[in-house]
Image (cartoon, rainbow, N blue to C red):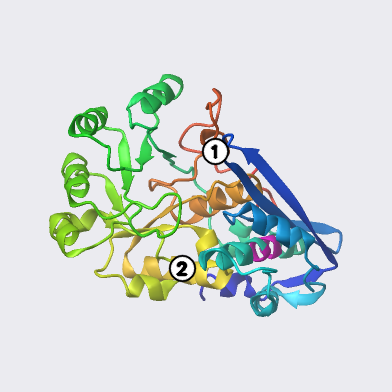
Amino acid sequence: MSTFDRVADLPLIVDSHELEQLEHAVSSEFIRTTTHVHLRGAGEEGIGEDVTYDGDAHDQLLAAAPPSLAGEWTLRSFSDHVERLDLWPEPPGMPAFRDYRSWAFESAALDLALRQAGQSLADALGLTPRPVRFVVSLRLGEPSSIEPIRQLLEGYPDMRFKLDPVPDWSAELVEELAALDRVDVVDLKGQYSGTVVDNPADATLYRRVAEAFPDAWIEDPALTEETDAVLEPHRDQITWDAPIHSVADIEELPFPPRTINVKPSRFGTLERLFATYDYCAAQGIGMYGGGQFELGVGRGHIQYLASLFHPEASNDVAPGGFNMTPVELGLESSPLDPRVDAVGFRRL
């Protein structure tokens, strides 16, 4: 039985739903906005989170006529229904945003159906949550400096990192970072286009980080004739994130990966996400989890899934406080205790 089949036929009663906008001022220039989707039925509530990176899109969703969700469903039929709905009053700025919004409704439905059934996700899947190893993802300022890492290590001396190399990473900075021996993933962000984090192909930078971090995963390179030649000896380290929305995307990669970054919201539906877990297990492909700067329940969702499917990997699912500036002391350290609710799809 597939992972999705274990939950697909759970009954689901939806009486009503409500949207709740969440905000966090990252800086004077950037306010992170997400939306909680609350589904209610049979005296229970399920919650999901829309992590679309467009504040206006969240405002438009709140202002629009609410989608028709009430009824008696199974998880499978509700998913099919949501996929037929147009949840976008205005076309999204990026195609991936459609998956992010669908995931909010799907994860809320999973939470609600499990609560109505009196089950936890772990019980429904027959899996045991385990402690989750995580890394902290960050950039190193402008200009890039090792100081953000040194400051974080003062409060969290055992922390490990996922870093975004950018063109101003000098040979000296890379040498300093390598000497710390704390880097698990270098995210080249070469697979993004039209975003604030675009990082064009740079063979010099790719060679520098690949040679300096021989044990780190190299995520999302932009493969040109020049960069492919540079990274060819390091293919076992190459992993993918932004292009992966389904099993088909894995099969279309330029070469078979040893591991991939599984961000649940990128898959849109439970069926595509769970099919990917099954495919990777069958093919011997490793997985690690990734986040989307969730402000609410979505962070617990990705931590919960990591605890079931890839707890010992370099999961980019650190507690949300590590995304804030400054980072407070007293946050949970790696590995995260696998505390999950006795019913539903939530981490305590």
Q: Nearer the viewer, residue 61 or 7?
A: 61
- By secondary structure, the bulk of the magenta-drawn segment is best described as helix
Q: Quadrant of residue 172?
A: top left
Q: Residues within 10 Å of mark 1 (few under 14, many from 20)?
A: some
Q: Is residue 343 visible?
A: no
Residue 121 sits inside the magenta stretch: no
User: Badges 1 and 2: C-beta atoms under 8 Å apart?
Assistant: no
Q: Nearer the viewer, residue 52 or 233?
A: 52
Q: Is residue 79 left or right of residue 168?
A: right
Instruction: Give the residue type that dot 2 points to.
Output: His
Instruction: Give the residue type that dot 1 points to.
Output: Pro
Secondary structure at badge 1 equals loop
Numbered label tally: 2
Q: Is residue 132 visible?
A: yes
Q: Is residue 221 left or right of residue 210?
A: right
From the viewer's perspective, is the residue at label 1 or at label 2 nearer?
Answer: 2
Disc ID at residue 42: none
Secondary structure at badge 2 equals loop
Q: Is residue 102 left or right of residue 19?
A: left
Disc ID at residue 319: 1
Residue 106 sits inside the magenta stretch: yes
Q: Kindly report the distance in space between the C-alpha atoms of the residues bearing marks 1 and 2.
A: 24 Å
Residue designated by label 2: 245
